[in-house]
Image: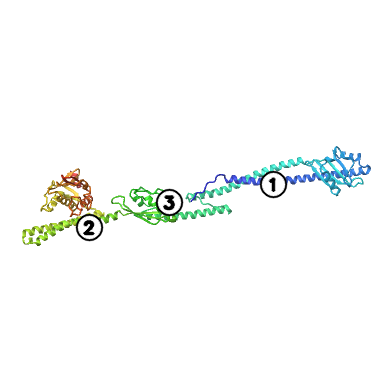
Amino acid sequence: MKEPMEPRFQLSMRWWLALVFAVITTVTAIAVAELLVWRAETTFRERSERSALWYVLASADAVTTALDEGGPGPDVDEVARRRRLSVFLFDSSGAVIGAMRSNGRELMSVPDATRAVTSALDGRRFARTYDSGRTGVVAVPIRSHQAQVLLAFGPQPGYGDSMTVFKDQVRLAVLGAAALGAAIGFVVASLLAARLKRIGAVASAIERGEFTAAPLRPRFGDEVGSLALMVERMRARLQGSIERLDNERARLERLLGRLDQGVVAIDADLRIEVANTAAARLLDVNSLAEGDELPDPWPPHFPLRYFAAQLFAPGSALAVERVTPAEGESYTVTGVPAGRFGTAMLVITDMSELERREHVQRDFVANAAHELRTPVTAIKSAIEVLQGGAKERPEERDRFLEIVERQAARLGRLSHALLILARAEAGDLEATLEPVELCAVLREVAAELPADDAPSVEVDCPEGILVQTHRDLIEQVVVNLATNATKYSGGSAVRLSARRLDGTVAIDVSDAGPGIPLEDRTRVFDRFYRGRERDASGFGLGLAIVRQAVRVLGGTLTIASEEGEGTTVRVLLPLPPVAEALR
């Protein structure tokens, strides 16, 4: 979602609202002042015109008397000088009676003279002032048989000074009103800003996810109070919703944390939204926090990030891949496409244990088939000899019955050892280790090896060597190594030896045969592997079982061989605690 842009200009409400109040008050005051000035000037002018009219009317009687007594002449001029007026007389046709100049002023210089005379001839009085009432023109009809209109022009007291004083006072009033409006606006804006600031603080806390601020308590039921009440209700509801979401998220995290499968939710940028601890363990990272990039732990074998990116492609479907990054490790990765939600899911399942158990089960069958073949064959051969007539000869019968008994006992121990080996490999059982007298084991193995047409077996073991091991398993190890050595010794003697070596016991099985080629030496312990010179009738399981048993017993296995000089296989096993202390 696109983030809202910050405003270009930052101006507090108290200042711009105070400015608005000041402008409104100033405009209103100016309008009222203009109206007052116009009304005052009109009133002053009307009063000045009435004063001029009454002054001229008072003079008109004297002019009329002077006309009736002597006509236009010195008497009329005397009245004009005494009244400080310029007086002009007109007949009924509008023609001037007498001189065109009166009291030092020409008739042509009198403003609005024609209109004034016309108005007086129509029976209406005409009065006008000029220059802020300092001069005036008055025309009135008179009752004289010689003249019908009297036109007078003269100075007046004027009202300019009064208007100047009035305008100055009006200006002061306008300035005072503007200042008062700004002050009122500042106070009102400050009160509104303080209320809105409290609402804004709560809204900002809600934006940050904080819901513990002091609750809003509107004092007035106006629009701002209603807004505060709605914000408070919204905060309470959001707090409840977020608490419920947090509880659901916590429950989901607990549920995911209990899963053995790794669950990872990612966005289109391949960043983590949700991941459980199993996912971090399976992806071989310390932790997977929200916002971290999705790791890519198996780049040579499986590009996980590329696989995840395909889940955001249009029309992508559920995908399942098998990953085997190393021997003994196997995973399935299930990808759930994002679709319209914008979040894809990865489910990682560790299949290593399941495959190991299946592998152990297969190994057990193969091991059992391989190991049980020798005693079963020996028992079968002894029975065939007995049935062929040896039972009639007591010495032969007893000898072959002893073979059957010995091989049957060996068969029981072998079966027990194979079961223990299989269960230990599967992780269901830890092989019980105990001190075992090693020389006795080596001599028993040497005695049980076939004697007919087989190379001799020598035992070199000092008495009293104890080893910390499982007797049946170590017997199987020595039997398999000795059997393999006699088979490929080329007729030379096979030597079984044991000795203490740096806190361990070394068991060596040596032969002087042709040795193992270099290309086969690193693979002789692999299951079902047979080198070029090996017996084709075997299954290639003997040495594989040896390696498996030695690993279960906690030992190590090495091989030294040179072509034409024989082979020595060494097994290193730990000394028992008592023997180690006495050493």
Amino acid type at mark 1: Ala
Mark 1 or 3, nearer chain start: 1
Q: Secondary structure at mark 3?
A: loop
- Residue 430 in view (yes/no): yes
Nearest to the observer: residue 437 or residue 215? 437
Mark 3 surroundings: few (<14), some (14-19) or many (≥20) residues within 10 A:
some
On screen, residue 152 versus residue 562, left or right, reads right
* Image location of residue 11, percent across then percent down: 57, 44
Cα separation between marks 1 and 3:
64 Å
What label does residue 257 carry, if any? none
On screen, residue 152 versus residue 234, left or right, reads right
Q: Secondary structure at mark 1?
A: helix
Label 3: which residue?
268
What label does residue 365 carry, if any? 2
Nearest to the observer: residue 236 or residue 448? 448
Q: Looking at the image, which residue sits at the far top?
A: 104
Label 1: which residue?
31
Mark 1 or 2, nearer chain start: 1
Mark 2 surroundings: few (<14), some (14-19) or many (≥20) residues within 10 A:
few
* Residues at discs 3 and 2 in contact (Cβ within 8 Å): no
Nearest to the observer: residue 396 or residue 387? 387
Nearer the observer, disc 1 or disc 3? 3
* Image location of residue 218, percent across then percent down: 55, 52
Amino acid type at mark 2: Val
